[in-house]
Image (spheres, rainbow, N blue to C red):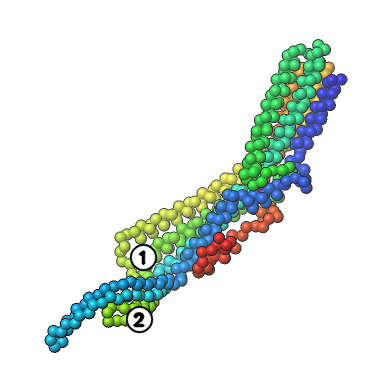
């Protein structure tokens, strides 16, 4: 009857491990943390992503800086201070006549100068367009960061879900091995088995406890990673499901979509535009510059005889560069080389995206096939374990055979849990590879960060040091 009890315990273990392996696929539970909720928290609170958003806001300021070239520059100057003068004049009109003046005065001068650039070789226009291209490139780089953050959140969530299930499997395995050891000792006491069988059971139990400790360490590490990426301590995690429905159904379509719309590619395209405009900006150093300058000056006590003077002027200034040491030519050549580099970077980005799409597609296909294989492995291991136990009950199998079959079932369950985790992560990885891993595509219930809001707030600001958020 002891073996029947052990077989019952094994069947309970099989049912329990089946539940552990299958919980990654059932519908989400209302009382548990969900993958969608984790993605929302990561999207809102991840410090790395928030730092990238701040970087985009800083890049926005390049546009008003460039637009300042269209606006006048106004400066105020003033001076005041005591001065002693001793002046002797000689008049030669008819005969030498000398006059002497001396005294202390306090000359002061107040003035306003305004300068308006009328033409500078289109530098301002090109700098503005360049700054706008840099803003667009920064936004696309932010999209890359958003995808990386969301994929990290998915990976952290699924790793914790997997490691929690594996820990539960290993604990259940220890319970079964404890029961196995107890039954083996009872049979040893009545002379049915030898001391070797008891030692084998004890060894396998010790190994099972070691596996539990390793699983606990891995679980704690996953908890720490979850806290780092998501920003909160994990609760009871609900199951998750793949997102194949958001990805192209054919590999050529996935490659075409990725190489055309992936943010890494579009960011590289905007960088090419910025580099091209930098060439034009550098070439503008060879063009003449035309500016209009207005000046108003009010002076008091400029000398011992004048109490007050007032001057006003409007002057046009034309500057034609002839030779400036050759630095401007070097800057033009440098800008052209940088443009060539950015074009090569664009080709590299497309090749990298294509490679990532093909690799992710293969990993997803392998994950799908691996699930079918591991499910078949689990079913076969369950049947084998039940058969070995029945044969051991009638003396046709040894204790070691039972222990080996038990371990094979545990290994198969762990493989199934890992395969299910890989299946979900691979679907999100493919979605990221084609450039569609975003809150809008996933339908996350979270306010989407709009980079254009801050851009419009600062683009045409003429003065002020406070940021739109009040800092």
Would you say 403 lies left or right of 346 here?
A: right
Residue situated in front as seen by the camera: 273 or 469: 469
Classify mark 1: helix, strand or loop: helix
**Residue 101 versus residue 169 in the image, above or below:** below
Q: Quadrant of the C terminus?
A: bottom right
Disc 2 target residue: 310
Q: Quadrant of residue 407?
A: top right
Q: Estimate how packed mark 2 is, as few (under 14), some (14 to 19) or many (20 or more) residues with alpha carbons within 10 Å.
A: few
Q: Position of residue 29 (x, y in %)?
A: 77, 45
Give the image location of residue 158, x and y in percent: 68, 41
Select label 1 or label 2 by which is in front: 2
Q: Which disc, if any, is residue 459?
A: none
Q: Is residue 242 left or right of residue 451?
A: right
Query: Tag 2 or tag 1, which sits nearer the N-term?
Result: 1
Q: Circle 2 — which element?
A: strand
Foreground of the two, 245 or 78: 78
Residue shown at the point (75%, 16%) measured from the top left: 198
Whether label 1 touches label 2, CB < 8 Å: no
Query: Where does the image place residue 128, in percent across and percent down from the top left?
Result: 48, 65
Bin the neighbour count of mark 1 within 10 Å (Cα to Cα): few under 14, some 14-19, many 20 and up. some
């Amino acid at each position: 009857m002891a073996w029947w009890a052990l077989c019952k315990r094994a069947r309970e273990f099989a049912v329990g491990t089946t539940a552990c392996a299958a919980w990654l696929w059932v519908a989400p539970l209302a009382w548990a943390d969900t993958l969608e909720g984790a993605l929302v928290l990561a999207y809102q609170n991840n410090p790395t992503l928030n730092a990238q958003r701040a970087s985009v806001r800083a890049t926005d300021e390049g546009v008003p800086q460039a637009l300042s070239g269209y606006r006048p520059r106004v400066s105020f100057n003033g001076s005041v201070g005591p001065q002693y003068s001793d002046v002797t004049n000689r008049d030669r009109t008819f005969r030498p006549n000398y006059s002497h003046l001396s005294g202390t005065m306090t000359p002061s001068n107040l003035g306003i100068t305004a300068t308006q650039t009328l033409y500078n070789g289109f530098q301002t226009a090109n700098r503005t367009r360049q700054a706008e291209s840099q803003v667009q490139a920064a936004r696309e780089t932010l999209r890359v960061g958003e995808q990386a953050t969301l994929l990290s959140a998915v990976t952290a969530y699924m790793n914790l879900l997997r490691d929690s299930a594996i820990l539960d499997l290993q604990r259940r395995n220890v319970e079964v091995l404890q029961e196995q050891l107890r039954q083996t000792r009872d049979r040893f006491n009545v002379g049915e088995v030898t001391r070797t069988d008891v030692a084998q059971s004890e060894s396998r139990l010790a190994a099972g406890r070691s596996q539990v400790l390793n699983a606990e360490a891995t679980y704690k590490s996953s908890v720490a990673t979850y806290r780092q990426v998501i920003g909160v301590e994990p609760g009871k995690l609900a199951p998750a499901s793949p997102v194949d429905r958001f990805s192209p159904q054919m590999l050529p379509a996935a490659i075409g979509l990725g190489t055309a719309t992936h943010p890494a590619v579009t960011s590289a395209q905007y960088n090419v535009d910025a580099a091209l405009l930098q060439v034009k900006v550098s070439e503008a150093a060879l063009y003449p510059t035309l500016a209009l300058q207005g000046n108003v000056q009010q002076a008091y006590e400029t000398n011992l005889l004048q109490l007050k003077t007032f001057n006003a002027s409007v002057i046009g200034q034309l500057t034609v560069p002839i030779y400036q040491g050759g630095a401007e030519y070097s800057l033009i050549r440098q800008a052209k080389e940088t443009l060539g580099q950015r074009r090569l970077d664009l080709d590299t980005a497309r090749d990298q995206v294509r490679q990532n799409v093909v690799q992710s597609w293969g990993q997803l296909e392998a994950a799908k096939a691996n699930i079918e294989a591991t499910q078949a492995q689990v079913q076969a291991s369950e049947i084998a374990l039940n058969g070995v136990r029945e044969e051991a009950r009638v003396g046709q199998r040894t204790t070691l055979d039972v222990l080996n079959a038990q371990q094979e079932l545990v290994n198969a369950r762990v493989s199934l849990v890992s395969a299910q985790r890989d299946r979900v992560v691979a679907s999100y990885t493919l979605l990221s590879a084609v450039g569609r891993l975003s809150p809008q595509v996933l339908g996350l219930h979270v306010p989407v960060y709009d980079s254009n809001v801050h851009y419009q707030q600062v683009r045409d600001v003429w003065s002020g040091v406070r940021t739109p958020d009040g800092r």
